[in-house]
Image (tube, helix red, strand yellow):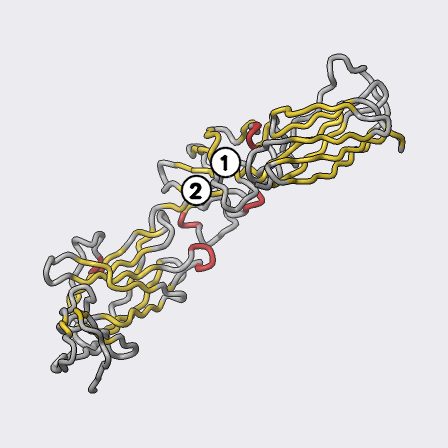
Amino acid sequence: GYFEIARLPEGRYKGGFNTTGKYLSRYFGDTDDAESAKEILVREGQPLTGIDVKLLKSATVSGTVSTPVDGPIYELDYQGSFDVVAFRQDPDTAEFELAGVARPETGDFTISDLSPGTYRFEFRAPYPGFYRAVFSGGASSLEDAEDVVITEGQQLRLPAVLMDSLSGDWRNFCDTTLMRISTTPPRVGETISTSGGMWVPFSDAKERRLECNLENASYTYRWSIVGQDQYETERVFAETTAPSVTVPPEALGKHIRVNVIGENPDYDFGTFTSDTTTDVTAPALTPRADSPKVAKQTSTLGVKTKAKKKRKVEFAVAVKSNKKAASGQVAVYRGTQKVKTVKLKKSGKATVKLSKQPKGSQTYTIRYLGSAKTKPAAKNVRVRTKK
């Protein structure tokens, strides 16, 4: 039980004992708070004794959380487990502060390493709208919760807690396949859509396949653009009351997903987020005004990309028609902005050089504009510029 710390430089110190197991951590001044620990003055060449600390045995609280449907932790895979939160009253301020959290996986929970004191407990589901939060003593708020006094080293088991179900449950869509985007792949300027929502009364929650559309339900659809880069911020571009939206130009080369918010006067509101679409592609090609109305031969467009230093980008383009060199022009778009147009050589090839391009990853569309005999073609490429 004795300790010694040698070769300390002169100065002011705070210290304590970090422990695990059946004892609590304590600090100089006989406190469990590192910030309020007693400050010790150490002088050169002067031994310091009598810095004593009494370790306290830790207390443990345990119990069981149940639901009114299936007993302990109904539908764990869908809802996740419950949180059991312990709040300890500060002796100086009388405020209740967070002291410990447990997340029971099967309904049984244990919170260890608790100091002696007055506690209140909260039992809550991780997803709001499925069960009401319950506090110690069956109260509906922390202010009205029953005090639980815990002594040093006590092994306390709380009374079993029965979670209070709400009148209904917004079950989102139960199946993400109902959120598939209707057009694959989506194109700029075209309309994409998704299905409507479904509600399930809580009394039928056990029968997961028993779904019912309710006429008085309303839905809000928030459509967002998701970038290719995982660090790129997701941005909402439209909010609709109908399950469809027009794909904007800024979505080119990126993805789209929709977050649906369902509301019903008889139920609690809920949300669901769909999977993302495939890459958004460029708008459908339209013939030029001076192009012939009919072009029978198909074209094959090849593009090789090279990113150079100082934000320069180079495209090597080759176009063939019936295995022969094609003629005509090639246009390069960055997003929806045309940045350059070049004429194919007799070999059906062209080199497009761009300078001072934006930093980072960009989507370019290389378009062969067609000719009197050959149909247009296009290809998307993604390039990350170099400094």
Amino acid type for the residue under numbered disc 1: Ser
Task: Tell me the element at label 1.
Answer: strand
Q: Could you tell me which residue is drawn at 35 percent across and 58 percent down? A: 68
Residue bearing the label numbered 2:
271
Seen from the viewer's position, the closer of residues 231 and 350 is 350
Q: Could you tell me which residue is drawn at 76 percent across and 33 percent down? A: 317
The image position of residue 334, as x and y in percent, is: 62, 30
Task: Tell me the element at label 2.
Answer: strand
Tell me: 52 left or right of 217. Answer: left
Q: Quadrant of the C terminus?
A: top right
Give the mark nearer the N terminus: 2 vs 1.
Answer: 1
User: Mark 2, residues whose alpha carbon is within 10 Å: few (<14), some, or many (≥20)?
Assistant: some
Q: Could you tell me which residue is drawn at 47 percent across and 29 percent down? A: 240
Give the distance between the C-alpha atoms of the residues marked 2 and 1, in whole angstroms.
Answer: 15 Å
Seen from the viewer's position, the closer of residues 21 and 42 is 42
Seen from the viewer's position, the closer of residues 23 and 28 is 28
Tell me: 128 left or right of 184. Answer: left
Q: Going by the picture, which residue comes out furthest to the top?
A: 290
> Image quarter for residue 254?
top right
The image position of residue 206, as x and y in percent, is: 45, 54
Location of residue 15 with respect to 125 vertically, above or below: below
Location of residue 231 with respect to 353 vertically, above or below: below
Seen from the viewer's position, the closer of residues 203 and 3 is 3
Location of residue 44 with respect to 193 vertically, above or below: below
Residue bearing the label numbered 1:
224
